Amino acid sequence: MAEKKFEAALERLEEIVQELEKGDLPLEQSLKLFEEGIKLSRICTKRLEDAERRVEILLKDKAGNILAQPFEEQEEE
């Protein structure tokens, strides 16, 4: 499977979940979609873990300690 961006993988995963939840697919097609969903889930998990590692690197001080930084949400106008 070609590398996918996180957003595209997540969107496709949501589509698969909706299709499977309908419950009107033949078994073989359901299994095929399930397998695709598992692959997409792994892609999303890997991307999130990579992002988390990058954030931790950015938040380390000179001694290598991770500094807890509160996340400040931007106010919507």
Image (cartoon, rainbow, N blue to C red):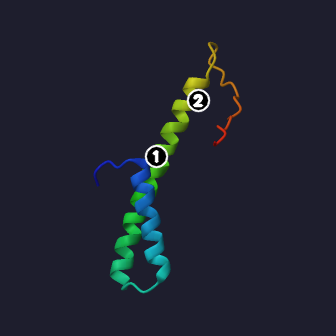
Locate residue 39, reporting x and y percent.
39, 59
In the image, is 57 to the left or to the right of 10? Answer: right
| Residue density around tag 2, few if under 14, some if 14–19, many if 20 or more, within 10 Å | some
Locate residue 58, reporting x and y percent.
56, 24
Locate residue 20, reporting x and y percent.
45, 77
What residue does disc 1 label?
Answer: 46
Residue 38, visible in the rendered structure = no
Query: Residue at left 55%, top 25%?
Result: 57
- Observer-nearest of 13 and 30: 13
Identify which amino acid the numbered label 2 is placed on.
Answer: Glu
Image quarter in which the N terminus is found? bottom left
Q: Quadrant of residue 12?
A: bottom left
| Residue density around tag 1, few if under 14, some if 14–19, many if 20 or more, within 10 Å | few
Query: Could you say whether the residue bearing mark 2 is in a helix, strand or loop?
Result: helix
On screen, residue 24 above or below 46:
below
Query: Residue at left 51%, top 37%?
Result: 51
In the image, is 32 to the left or to the right of 70? Answer: left
Residue 11, visible in the rendered structure = yes
- Observer-nearest of 7 and 47: 7
On screen, residue 48 above or below 33:
above
Q: Which residue occupies the extreme left position in the image?
A: 2
Locate residue 65, reporting x and y percent.
66, 21
Identify which amino acid the numbered label 1 is placed on.
Answer: Lys
What residue does disc 2 label?
Answer: 56
Query: Residue at left 43%, top 68%?
Result: 15
Image quarter in which the C terminus is found? top right
Query: Could you say whether the residue bearing mark 1 is in a helix, strand or loop?
Result: helix
Instruction: Return the disc, 2 or 1, that comes first in the chain's sequence.
Output: 1
